[in-house]
Image (cartoon, rainbow, N blue to C red):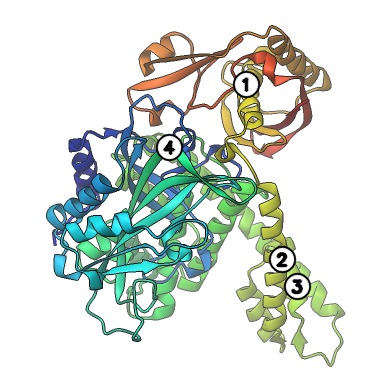
Amino acid sequence: MKQLTSDELRRLYLDFYHSKRHAVIASASLIPENDPTVLFTTAGMHPLVPYLLGEKHPAGKRLTDVQICVRTGDIDEVGDASHCTFFEMLGSWSLGDYFKKEAIEWARELLLDKLGFDADKFAVTVFAGNEDCPRDEESASVWRSLGVPEDRIFYLDKKHNWWGPAGVTGPCGPDTEMFIDTGKPKCSESCSPACDCGKYLEIGNNVFMQYFKNADGTFSPLAQKNVDQGMGLERMLCILNGYTSVYETDLFDFAIKKLEQLSGKQYGNDEKDTVAMRIIADHTRTATFLIGDINGISPSNVDQGYVLRRLIRRAMRYCRTLGVDDSALTELARLYVDKYKTAYPYIKDNEERVVNELTLEKDKFAKTIEQGLKEFDKIVSHLPADMQVFPGKTAFRLYDTFGFPIEMTAELAKERGFTLDRQGYDKALQEHQALSKAGAEQKFKGGLADGGELTARLHSATHLLNAALKLVLHDDSIQQKGSNITSERLRFDFNFPRPLTAEEIAEVEKLVNQQIALDVPVKLEEMSVDEAKAQGAVGVFASKYGEVVKVYTIGFSKEICGGPHAKRTGELGKFRIIKEQSSSAGVRRIKAVLE
């Protein structure tokens, strides 16, 4: 196998698919546009949902990119050898062009011929079929024709070899995944790539979107069949270079060295210190990208900002475990900016913002600790004198209300002669997580992935809202800082330093409804980014579209956008703002409906 740096692997991947007539597109923002199903961009396909549903992409039917992603579902696993909250996904797509045969042939060529994986250790999985959709014999047949022997083609169930849909309804289909056999002995007679025993390492997958899941749970064939290939950059680097952990790759090694220098401890010597270094390195990298994003966010108590705050404070907590000052985060952030400035130039432009936000959060966390200490003392003073166990529910309240880490509560309890009811704490945490998950599922239902007409109309309404805000507030610097659409309402975040007055809100509604009443057609044009800017089109997301962009003219609005949209403004009905509030420092949030 080839020894590669991260820069070399990115370039090799993009060059390979460019040679297969794929247009190279830039990574989209980590903060999704209009998609309520996720807080962050969690996969390469998320920014491409409109095109997977049939919208025409300005760069064509074959695309490739390196998409930055954030997933926090496995945050408690970070600290092991492979889990990361931020990662880069090498991706390629066919939007109604080629399908299984070409996708599989090229995946094999890339992995075995270009990257040098051993063909004798190469194994694949395909969908075994179920009552909804048949066994994927087509993919298995292509693999056989390429020399993969029968005993290394595994048929697995929907849990392992099916993707989607992203929303309640939408495109979905079987996938085929590619693995390397590490040579470890089988864990059982039935050992397969479905096992977590470590015998098989996944190195890539191809999703074949050939079905549409309907609202009633049935599946229909898609008119436009798509291919979505994904390969994780960190994992690939780790395997290609023969490392045992992603933290040994050039994406992390400099950060680990800095933490060794600051702490006087050696990575790999002590498990506790090693885990702390990994968590600090991972969470700081993620925070750097979330704050430094083209739609950069700030720590807060809601939505994306809450997750960001949790990551930063968790990293700070582990700084204490490692024996280094919280300022280590700003030192690491500058190192990450330097590392990624070539691949993602905007991260360098936003370096000072990243450092300032981390410094502010450091100061806020210090106050939180102080507040938590006072609350702890108050609680202890009210506990019965003969009580020896510090209640788990109380420990959870300290964490939930004051952000007070459980480890600190445990240490303080021990100092005061208590043992901590950790079981009670874990139970309270699990109950809280279950409620949060249920709430999130309710909150993030529907959206553009469902492809409904109402969501398209609401999307068009956000364009009119954006234009109206600039006019009413006499501020051309106003930009979209985030958008979230469900089938019931739109949510639009924008930069502005103060709450809107009742009169301003009424005037914004009036202007939007005037444009709707005109019933003008929604006009779509394709042009270069420079032409779009010359015509006054707005859009902070232009960098992800490549050389040719879609520009939608909707009444007095002209924006770079991917769609989908209504056909005429008259389809929108009546626009009404139902709430205007703060989202985070310097960012306001409007929620509105169409009636």
Based on the displayed image, in which of its 4 quarters is residue 121 positioned?
A: bottom left
- Disc 1 versus disc 3: nearer the observer: 1
Between the residue at mark 3 and the residue at mark 2, the CA separation in whole angstroms equals 21 Å
Estimate how packed mark 3 is, as few (under 14), some (14 to 19) or many (20 or more) residues with alpha carbons within 10 Å.
some
Instruction: Locate the C terminus and report the quarter of the image it occupies.
Output: top right
Residue 415, compared with residue 405, is above or below; it is below
**Mark closest to the chain's N terminus, 1 or 2:** 2
* The one of 477 and 141 positioned closer to us in this rendering: 141
The residue indicated by pointer 2 is: 432
**Mark closest to the chain's N terminus, 2 or 4:** 4
Q: Amino acid at mark 2?
A: His
Q: Which mark is residue 16?
A: none
The location of residue 522, given as percent across then percent down, is: 57, 14
Between the residue at mark 1 and the residue at mark 3, the CA separation in whole angstroms equals 47 Å
- Disc 4 versus disc 3: nearer the observer: 4
Q: Amino acid at mark 1?
A: Asn
The residue indicated by pointer 3 is: 376
Residue drawn at x 81%, y 75% is 379
**Mark closest to the chain's N terminus, 1 or 3:** 3
Pointer 2 and pointer 4: residues touching (CB < 8 Å)?
no
Q: Amino acid at mark 4?
A: Ala
* The one of 261 and 76 positioned closer to us in this rendering: 76
The residue indicated by pointer 4 is: 28
